[in-house]
C-alpha cells in the first residue's frame, strides 16, 4: 500500500512542478536577493523565455539552534532548469544531479487547455487548500506586488517573480529581499549551460528524477523498488480510453501513463488528487497488503477499502480476476468508501 501512496505523492508533486506553461509574465531578467534571519547570504536568479529557462545560484550559511544544540550549514549551489531538464550542482559536496522532469508535456497540455480565467481559478484553489490567502497589493520599491501568505511565509510577488519573503517556521526565520532587479534585460545563453566543475549523477527515472535532486526516498521505498514487478496484460490503449472518459466532478485528468508494468491516471482539483492504478494481481499479497482493509462485494467484484491516516489518504482496491488485474483508486486527501465507489462505477474496465 505504501508504494502506491508514494507513487501518487511523486506524481502529484511532479505534475505541479510542470504546470506553468509560463512561469513569469516577464520574458527575461535578473534578480539578486539578500538573505537574512537564520540564513545569511545571497541568491541570484537569471531567467529567459518567460521562466522556461532559469539559473539560480545560492551562497549562504544557515544557523539553527534546537534544544540547546547549534547547527551551521553552508550552501554553495547552482541550479539550471531548461523546460523539463535540470542540473543541480553542490560545490561543497562536489557532487551534482541531472535528470528530466516526468510528466512535463502532460502538465503543459493540462495548462494550455485552460483559459486564463480557469488558470487563475486553479491557482486560487491551490492557495486556499494550502491554507493560504491573498492580503492585497503593495508597492515595493516601485514595483506593484501581490502579497500572499501561506504556511507561515509572506511573499511579495511581481508578475510571477518573488521579490521579497519573510516568515518563521519551527523557529527558523527566513527573509529574502531583492537588492537588484533587471526585468526584461538580456541574459547570455551561456548562463543556462549545465554548471561546470562537478560530476553529475543521472536521476531521470520516474520515481527518482526531479525528486532525486531534492532528496532520496527512505530505505523502505528503495527496497520496494528493487522488488520485481510483474507487468500487467491489460491493454494500455483500453485503459487510457476508459480513464479519459471518466468524469470526476470538479477534477481534471492531468496525466495517463504506463511505466514499470503498471498503468496510471492522475486527476487533480487544486491540490486534491485522485489516482487510478491498474497492475497485475500477482503483485499483491492479500494477506499482508490488505490485512487492515474492509473487504466486501460491489457490482460483482471483490473490493477492499482502507484509510491511511499518516498520509491523509484513502484507497479502494477492486479485483478483476478475469483480467488478472487489480485496480486501485486512491485519493489524497481521503474520500469515503461511498465516494470512491461512485468513481469506480464510472470506470468500466
Image (cartoon, helix red, strand yellow):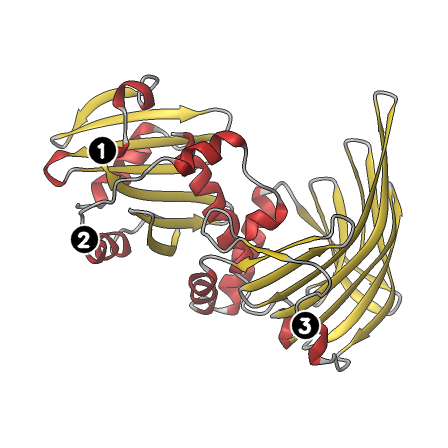
Other residues around mark 1 within 10 Å, as few (<14) / some (14–19) / many (≥20): some
Residue identified by numbered label 1: 282
Measured from the top left, where is residue 126 in percent x and y? 56, 49
Q: Is mark 2 on a helix, strand or loop?
A: loop
Residue visible at 57% across and 56% down in the picture = 123
Proximity of marks 1 and 2: CB atoms separated by less than 8 Å: no
Number of on-image labels: 3
Q: How far apart are marks 2 and 3 (CA)?
A: 41 Å
Measured from the top left, where is residue 269 in percent x and y? 45, 49
Other residues around mark 2 within 10 Å, as few (<14) / some (14–19) / many (≥20): few
Q: What element carries label 3?
A: helix
Lower sequence index among marks 1 and 2: 2
Residue identified by numbered label 3: 192
Q: What element carries label 1?
A: helix
Left or right, 6 with reference to 324: right
Q: Distance between the residues labelled 1 and 2?
A: 17 Å
Lower sequence index among marks 2 and 3: 3
Q: How far apart are marks 3 and 1 (CA)?
A: 46 Å
Q: Nearer the viewer, residue 269 or 178?
A: 178
Q: In which quarter of the image is the C terminus?
A: top left
Amino acid at each position: 500500500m505504501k508504494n502506491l501512496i508514494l507513487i501518487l505523492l511523486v506524481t502529484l508533486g511532479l505534475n505541479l512542478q510542470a504546470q506553468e506553461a509560463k512561469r513569469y509574465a516577464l520574458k527575461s531578467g535578473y534578480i539578486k536577493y539578500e538573505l537574512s534571519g537564520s540564513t545569511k547570504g545571497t541568491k541570484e536568479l537569471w531567467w529567459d523565455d518567460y521562466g522556461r529557462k532559469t539559473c539560480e545560484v545560492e551562497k549562504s550559511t544557515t544557523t539553527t539552534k534546537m534544544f540547546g544544540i547549534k547547527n551551521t550549514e553552508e550552501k554553495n549551489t547552482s541550479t539550471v532548469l531548461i523546460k523539463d531538464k535540470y542540473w543541480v550542482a553542490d560545490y561543497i559536496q562536489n557532487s551534482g544531479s541531472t535528470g528530466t522532469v516526468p510528466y512535463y508535456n502532460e502538465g503543459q497540455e493540462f495548462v494550455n487547455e485552460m483559459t486564463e480565467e480557469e488558470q487563475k481559478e486553479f491557482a486560487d484553489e491551490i492557495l486556499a487548500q494550502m491554507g493560504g490567502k491573498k492580503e492585497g497589493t503593495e508597492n515595493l520599491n516601485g514595483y506593484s506586488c501581490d502579497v500572499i501568505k501561506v504556511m507561515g511565509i509572506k511573499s511579495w510577488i511581481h508578475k510571477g517573480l518573488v521579490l521579497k519573503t519573510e516568515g518563521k517556521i519551527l523557529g527558523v526565520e527566513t527573509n529574502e529581499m531583492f537588492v537588484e532587479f533587471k526585468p526584461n534585460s538580456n541574459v547570455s545563453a551561456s548562463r543556462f549551460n549545465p554548471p561546470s566543475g562537478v560530476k553529475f549523477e543521472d536521476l531521470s527515472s520516474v520515481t527518482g528524477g526531479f525528486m532525486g535532486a531534492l532528496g532520496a526516498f527512505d530505505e523502505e521505498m528503495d527496497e520496494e523498488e528493487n522488488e520485481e514487478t510483474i507487468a500487467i496484460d491489460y491493454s494500455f490503449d483500453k485503459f487510457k480510453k476508459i480513464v479519459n472518459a471518466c468524469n470526476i466532478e470538479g477534477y481534471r485528468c492531468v496525466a495517463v501513463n504506463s511505466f514499470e508494468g503498471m498503468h496510471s491516471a492522475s486527476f487533480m482539483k487544486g491540490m486534491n488528487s485522485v489516482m487510478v492504478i491498474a497492475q497485475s494481481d500477482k503483485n499483491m499479497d492479500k494477506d499482508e497488503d490488505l490485512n487492515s482493509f474492509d473487504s466486501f462485494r460491489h457490482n460483482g467484484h471483490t473490493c477492499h477499502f482502507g484509510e491511511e491516516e499518516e498520509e491523509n489518504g484513502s484507497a479502494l482496491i477492486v479485483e478483476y480476476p478475469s483480467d488478472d488485474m487489480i485496480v486501485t483508486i486512491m485519493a489524497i486527501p481521503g474520500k469515503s468508501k461511498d465516494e470512491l465507489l461512485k468513481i469506480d462505477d464510472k470506470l468500466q474496465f
